[in-house]
Structure formats: structure tokens, C-alpha cells
Amino acid sequence: MNMTAITPDIFQAVADPNRRTLLDLLLDGPRPVQELGAHFDISLAAISQHLKVLLEAGLVSREARGKYRYYHAEPAALQQVHDWTEQYREFWEDRLDRLGGYLDQQANSDTETET
């Protein structure tokens, strides 16, 4: 297996459903904390903490515009997650293909014994 150097912070960052939702919202474009907070039943302070984790993991960037800080998604940082999970996708596709072949073989042998 190809073991890519992985930053654990990225996995910690995407493990939380609130942070995944924040990333999803930011994919639509930059937003300030106040606008992001309208989508959650948690405090703006909690939103800021989640954004801090995403920022430290390199999954978002921050830009000051007047008195507001706008957050931007940095989806390229998720490439590490994709690369790591890709090996498992290939593993499971291979296993499922082999299972499908086995089941087809069993169905064919059952049909032959019935006739």
C-alpha cells in the first residue's frame, strides 16, 4: 500500500460534523462568521473555534474585509484525505468484484444442477 505522509490535523478537522458543514458552506464562496453561524444551533464562539481548527489544518483561509473576517474553503488541502482513502476504495472495489464473480459462479452452478 502507498502510505502518503498525512497531517493528522486534517483528519481531526473533518471528523466533526459541524466542521464538515462549515466546509460545505464555504464551498459556495467566502462568508463571515456571522453568516456561517446562522446555519447552526451553536454559539458564534463555537463556530469560531471550529473555524480555527479548519484554519490550522489548512482547510480554510481567512481574509479581513473591514471589520469582518471572511473565511474561504481551501479544498486542495483535502487531497491528502482523498489520497489516503483512495487505496481503500480500490481495495473494496476489488473485493466486491471478486464477490460478484463468486456469486455469479454459484448462480450458474445452481442453474446447471437444476436442469
Image: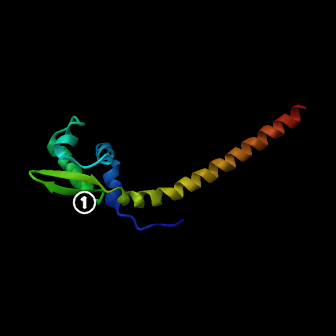
Picture colour scheme: rainbow
Q: What element carries label 1?
A: helix
Residue shown at 18% from the left, 48% from the top: 48
What percent of the width, then of the height, locates residue 78? Answer: 38, 57
Q: Which residue is drawn at 34% across and 49% down?
A: 15
Q: Looking at the rendering, which quadrant does residue 80 occupy?
A: bottom left
What residue is drawn where x is 18% and y is 57%? Answer: 63
- The part of the image, by quadrant, that contains residue 82 is bottom left
Does 100 sit left or right of 48 as displayed?
right
Name, please, the residue furthest toward the right.
Answer: 115
Q: In this view, does 38 lie above or below 99?
A: above
Q: Position of residue 27 (x, y in %)?
A: 33, 48
Please tell me in which quadrant of the rendered image residue 74 appears: bottom left
Q: Quadrant of the N terminus?
A: bottom right
> Residue 83: horizontal and vertical position, in percent?
46, 60
Which of the pair 33/16 is nearer the observer?
33
Q: Is residue 31 above or below residue 3?
A: above
Quadrant (top left, top right, bottom left, bottom right) of the C terminus: top right
Drawn side of residue 6 relative to residue 96, left or right: left
Q: Identify the residue under disc 1.
A: 56
Count every numbered label the image shows and give the total.
1
Question: What kind of residue is marked 1?
Answer: Glu
Q: Which residue is drawn at 83% across and 40% down?
A: 109
State the image coordinates of residue 3 (x, y, percent, origin top left): 48, 66
